[in-house]
Amino acid sequence: MSFSRRQFLAAPALLAQPVQRPNVLWIMVDQLRFDCLGANGNRLIRTPHLDRLAARSANYQLGFVQSPVCVPSRASYFTGRYPHRHKNRVNYTPLDAREKLAQQYFHEAGYQTGVVGKLHYYPPTADHARRLGWDKVQIDDGVGATDPYSDYVAWRKRNDPKASVGYQSTAPRPGKNPFRAAIAYEYTPTAWTGTQTRQMLRELAGGSQPFFLYSSFFKPHSPHTVPEPYDEMYDGVEIPLPKPVTLADIERLPLPVQKQILRGKPQYAMDRARLEWVYRSYYAGVSMIDREVGLILEELERSGKSANTIIVFTTDHGDQLLEHGLEGKNVFFEASVRVPFFLCWPAKLPAGPRQDLVEMVDILPTLLELCSISIPSSIQGRSLLGGGKREFVFAENVIPEVINSGGLDMPYAPGKGVGGIRHPDAKMIRTLRWKYNHYPGHGGELYDLPNDPGEERNLYASAAHQSVVREMKDRLLDFLITADETDQIAPRWLLPR
């Protein structure tokens, strides 16, 4: 259950004067599945540091992103607003300048702000990041097109004796991991992000202001390149693989989802031995993150600021890992939209698992309230300090994804849509039992989650479930009409929150 404002305000330390605002350390990773942490039930993966953090945290078991793709999801995290409002719908597109981001709230409240790693702004430059409220900036988006702006790439050129070798290049051995990295661990983006985070943490902790530090890792996002010794960490470990699917299975899905799975070079028939190495390397990437998180938390302890620092750990979306025949994300299956989320402040927030439905737009208003910063009415998320529970969570995405670079050639054409889907803006609504996905002009999906956790039996056309379809569609319609209420009402009409 959620902790209440009464529980929070009853903490003796908060009643002392003067009140010292807490610091915030927000650790974000990219494309991490909910079920790929030991703390969330995975008995094969090695994540001891994250498991210890989870044990000290409110560990939300039912957290959902607002879009299963990087930029829209991150924009929702940092604005507290849904993608259809902030309009950052696809990767590498600029955010509306009228939107206000998390670091700007904290900067205005007297915090010193810092970012390390994957920021995913457009344009992807440090100057742009500083204009948006970051005081200290060390960025690396992990994508070749952004390398000219990457602090990591510039650092590696100065320090790695093998700097001429691509940072995602592989050097496999016969019969071993085909994703073995050609560069040493210490020169990887993961190690660099961890090192730079610790350095920035030392600088911020030594200052007189409270700090807001955002540490953002590229892993375990593909490509699944992993250096020694991580390339062998899961050798011999039999990781359960998803059930194979056929083209006929995919063609039973709604057309937008088919187009997403089959775009480019489809991977649904991937060799099972290679898929096993994908999983082993993905797990290894998570274990790399775990190492760096452990070192960051050690640095926080050494700083003396741990007791008054809120820690957030989460990810921008999950990864299908060939479930339903898809590599990557961009769909509404649980593997893409359900994510790990820890909120840690042991002195003030009760630790333990939480079974409440949570949206990632809820993180920003929660942090603002914890730090005694006013929450504006434009934020659509709900502070988790309140007693109310969500009856459902919402997500949306352009499916199939807009791609206007490389060989996929799937831009949006007015009147024609994306990849033959004229209205590609799909919506999801999920209760504790039901998931309903709506694809304008292409039907939908209805899954009975307790009885079909793999989302294999689409009940949308079932005669016995038409009342549920109507109920979920009505809920979705009501939500879409009311979610933007404060954006439609003149500010002078609003009572203070």
Image (cartoon, rainbow, N blue to C red):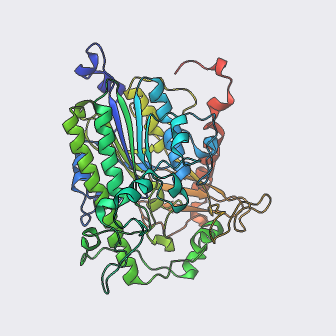
Which residue is the extreme one toward the right?
415
Which of the 4 image quarters holds residue 8?
A: top left
Which residue is the extreme one toward the top?
17
Q: How many marks?
A: 0
Q: Is residue 327 left or right of residue 405?
A: left
- 42 vs 472: above or below: below
Question: Which quadrant is home to the N terminus?
Answer: top left
Q: Is residue 346 left or right of residue 28?
A: left
User: Residue at point 61% right, 76% down?
Assistant: 251
Residue 316, percent across and down?
A: 46, 52
User: Residue at point 59% right, 46% down?
Assistant: 83
Q: Is residue 314 left or right of residue 239?
A: right
Q: From where the camera sits, is residue 3 visible?
A: no
Q: Nearer the viewer, residue 250 or 339?
A: 339
User: Residue at point 40% right, 69% down?
Assistant: 224
User: Residue at point 41% right, 37% down?
Assistant: 114
Q: From where the camera sits, is residue 170 visible?
A: yes
- 118 vs 44: above or below: above
Residue 189, percent across and down?
A: 38, 58
Q: Nearer the viewer, residue 292 or 356?
A: 292
Q: Is residue 398 left or right of residue 165?
A: right
Residue 348, percent across and down?
A: 27, 30
- 357 vs 132: above or below: below
Residue 311, percent across and down?
A: 32, 39
Q: Nearer the viewer, residue 99 or 444?
A: 99
Q: Nearer the viewer, residue 239 or 248?
A: 239
